[in-house]
Amino acid sequence: MKRTAGSGAGRVIILGVVAASLMASDFACAQSSAGRGPLTVPPAGITGSIPQTAPRAIPPARPNAMPKRLVQATPPKEWSGEDGQSSDPRMTAAAIREAAANFDRCVAGFAPDAARRGVSQANFDRLTADLSPDLRIMDLMDAQPEFTKSVWDYLDVLVTDARIARGREILAQNAATFAAVEKEYGVDRYIIAAIWGIESNYGTQGGDRSVLNSTATLACIGRRTAYFKDEFLAALEILNHGDLTPQQMRGSWAGAFGATQFMPTAFKKFAVDFDHDGKRNVVDSNPDIIASTAMKFKKDGWKQGDTWGFEVVVPQGFNYMYADRSKVMTIAQWEQLGIRRASGKPFPRATDQAYLTLPSGADGPGFLMLGNFRAIMRYNPSEAYALAIGHFADRLRGGQPLVQQWPRDERVLSRDERLELQQLLAQRGFYKGEPDGNLGNDTRKALRSYQVSAGLPADGFASSGVLDRLRGGSAPRASSGNSGGGFNLFNFGR
Ligand code: CA
């Protein structure tokens, strides 16, 4: 399901059928701010008004930010023959047909690049002999599901008793390897096991498409050919080197493969031959799988000895403008604002830096996210995904279910409703962008401003209630100069 360009690092695409069907609704797009940047420096102070922070630039789409809607439960085998839903001119049926007709010539044109990477013409010819365009991928790449999953549905499906039980078996069976890897890479075994369990259900659900064929298709057809050309060439290198056979190298439509769903370029960066058999086998070798995943987390800044975050209780009257990924403060500062761990236990270190997030708004649990949460999000820039991984890791460690209840009676907005929400916010001067149905950081900011002006908790959560209120027509309009979030207008502690 999903991953980062800049950090191209972790492009891993979740494949598990279960996970993929969930991601089909990618909560990240629907409800979490798409903020993918690193944690920012803490604001200077915490008293009085919330510090004004400059809006962060939205980074360019990252390769690993691919839609996770990779696999459907029963995927049709054939291309629909229809235009894509992205409105990209390269995704029209005519453009796809034209590119597909040129597929063999396109692939042959990659031979010089492959040669520069050490792939001989003979090997290139052998490895590419049977490639053919898999146009069904074009439908999958451009799918825009009408409904998105709520964060609680997402957690329910990903963090199950069966997956926890199997994870504990995996941890016991590979205890010596996990210990050696923890020692060498400093990465928590439970996080690695959680990635393994959620990305591929421990290697049992990883997709069945030829990675070379999928990446060749995407390198020649569609709207992301430049990105996938690099993935295709990396896949060729892996096969040319002999780490894996073409039969082993099968995965998602986007080319993620192996137990923890590495993209080919991620394999090149992170794969480790931990069992010293001369091959980096992230498909069938548990030592290689565990060490390679640890290597990725190490390179992504995992801090040994730290956890990812904590479930927290937010006090009555809390100023929700603080619940923003850009507002990083120390645990001590959060405690001064009345934030407590839901478990009732003390925080381990008052000096840890964290930001507060409320995935389902003021009516659901809060979480303080530490720096390691960022490392998880480099695996997949979805906050819901990273929360599932973190919570699942805690459960594998023996931790308890979340203490607080999700607002399970809250209805998830449809795509049309999300669009309408943005349009209504725009009409009232709160939203400046082009309504597109994707609720990102700008929508959240607009919602917060609206909520403040309407006297509602400014949690930025796109609930059906707030949509109904906007539809009512009596909603307040933005005052001039207050459409960007208006953080400085509101005092803490009201
Ligand atoms: Ca090996």
Image (cartoon, rainbow, N blue to C red):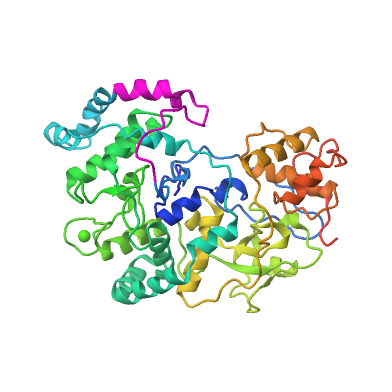
Give residue 222's position: percent from left, percent from top. Answer: 40, 29
In the image, ligand 1 is in what quadrant? bottom left
Q: Is residue 76 magenta?
A: yes
> Which one is in front, 330 or 242?
242
- Residue 457 is left or right of residue 413, and the answer is right
- Residue 488 is left or right of residue 260, and the answer is right
Which quarter of the figure has residue 8? top left
Residue 379 visible within the image: no
State the residue at coordinates (19%, 35%): 130
Residue 104 vertical placement versus 167 (above, below): above
- Residue 400 is left or right of residue 166, and the answer is right
Residue 250 vertical placement versus 224 (above, below): below
State the residue at coordinates (31%, 39%): 214
Which quarter of the figure has residue 80? top left
> Which one is in front, 109 or 135?
135
Screen quadrant of the C terminus? bottom right
Give residue 472's position: percent from left, percent from top. Answer: 84, 42
Q: Is residue 205 magenta?
A: no
Magenta region: which residues? Answer: 75-102
Residue 308 vertical placement versus 383 (above, below): below
Residue 449 vertical placement versus 87 (above, below): below
